[in-house]
Image (cartoon, rainbow, N blue to C red):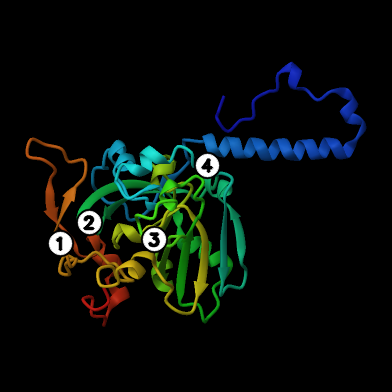
């Protein structure tokens, strides 16, 4: 039986005959059961139905265990192993994504519907962290522009603001004072960046729904930017007229700019960005190091977005 099929009820689960005397009771019971079953099915769904998407890198994916156990998801803590170790009590379903702001048609989108969408793609993208390490990850999801086109941005919309969930009862990192982050985690893009066909909303990875540790139920993927732009557990997307505040730019503006484009010629104030450590490339000599590519290897697709800009100033 497919995980998406409803199981047949056991004999003792069949509704007793007296309940059939009230049509309202029947309909209420059906509605509640269907909602519960849907939440259960989505939460337990692993395999996604996807098709190959464009722009996939001709590279070997990073081993899945490395991606799940070495990452930043500050809602669970500041250490790389915290998301995997501390996210077991996090329950990402049911989940509604709100898209609002300067739009004609604001929407509330059930993420369960996105997981079942026939439009889901797999895209093998490079991922470069600002901390000078990198991965290659097969994401599953859909281009962000497909959702933004549904809401019909107004002419005055020039930026897109993202907010994560605030749920300290399930996210121990939000109870810690150590990070200095004011929740929710916030990120932003220019509207033309958000509408670029490379910009992706991931609901899965490696052909399965996103693990809690990797940003369930949906996260932003902008492959030519440093990884901290990839906000996780997104609850709200708003179209706005002015540049929105972003978490790391607020915490340390001299180190983390709004654009955060991968650029080997612009170092972080505390380390070089000329090279990167390739996670998962284990050998006798340790992990491989390789030169960092401008725009993380996506120059051909995105460099035109920044014509006339000084990328040392607009970092």
Separation of residues labelled 4 and 3 (CA atoms): 22 Å
Q: Which dot marks residue 222?
A: none
Q: Position of residue 17 (x, y in %)?
A: 88, 23
Judging by the rendered image, the residue that carries numbered circle 4 is: 91
Judging by the rendered image, the residue that carries numbered circle 1 is: 271
Judging by the rendered image, the residue that carries numbered circle 3 is: 181
**Mark 3 or mark 2, which is nearer to you?**
3
Q: Is residue 264 above or below residue 26?
A: below
- In the picture as drawn, the residue positioned furthest to the top comes out as 11
- CA neighbours of label 4 inside 10 A, class few (<14), some (14 to 19), many (20+): some
Residue situated in front as seen by the camera: 178 or 33 = 178
Separation of residues labelled 1 and 2 (CA atoms): 8 Å
Whether pointer 1 and pointer 2 mark residues with C-beta atoms closer than 8 Å, the reply is: yes
- In the picture as drawn, the residue positioned furthest to the front comes out as 177
Separation of residues labelled 2 and 4 (CA atoms): 29 Å
Q: Position of residue 105 (x, y in %)?
A: 62, 69
SS for dot 4: loop
Q: Residue at x 37, y 44 (%)?
A: 83
Q: Residue at x 53, y 61 (%)?
A: 236
SS for dot 1: loop
- CA neighbours of label 3 inside 10 A, class few (<14), some (14 to 19), many (20+): some
């Amino acid at each position: 039986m497919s995980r998406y099929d409803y199981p047949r009820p056991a004999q003792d689960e069949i509704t007793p005959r007296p309940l059939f005397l009230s049509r309202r009771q029947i309909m209420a019971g059906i509605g509640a059961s269907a909602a519960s079953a849907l939440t259960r099915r989505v939460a337990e769904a692993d395999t996604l139905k996807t098709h190959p998407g464009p722009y996939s890198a001709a590279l070997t994916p990073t081993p899945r265990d490395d991606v799940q156990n070495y990452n930043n998801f500050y809602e669970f803590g500041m250490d790389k192993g915290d998301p995997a170790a501390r996210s077991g009590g996090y329950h990402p379903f049911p989940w509604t994504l709100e898209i609002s702001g300067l739009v004609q048609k604001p929407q509330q989108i059930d993420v369960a519907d996105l997981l079942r969408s026939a439009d889901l793609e797999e895209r093998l993208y490079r991922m470069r962290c600002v901390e000078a390490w990198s991965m290659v990850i097969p994401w599953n999801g859909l281009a962000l522009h497909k959702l933004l086109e549904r809401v019909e941005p107004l002419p005055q919309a020039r930026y897109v603001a993202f907010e994560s969930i605030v749920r300290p009862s399930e996210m121990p990192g939000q109870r810690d004072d150590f990070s200095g982050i004011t929740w929710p985690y916030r990120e932003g893009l220019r509207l033309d960046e958000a509408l670029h066909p490379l910009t992706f909303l991931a609901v899965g990875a490696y052909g399965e729904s996103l693990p809690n540790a990797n940003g369930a139920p949906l996260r932003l993927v902008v492959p030519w930017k440093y990884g901290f732009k990839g906000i996780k557990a997104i609850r709200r997307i708003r179209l706005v007229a002015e540049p929105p505040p972003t978490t790391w730019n607020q915490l340390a503006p001299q180190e983390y700019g709004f654009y955060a484009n991968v650029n080997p010629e612009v170092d972080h104030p505390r380390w070089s960005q000329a090279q990167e450590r390739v996670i998962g490339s284990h050998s006798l000599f340790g992990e491989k190091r390789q030169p960092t590519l401008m725009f993380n290897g996506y120059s051909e697709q995105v460099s035109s977005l920044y014509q006339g800009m000084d990328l040392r100033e607009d970092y």
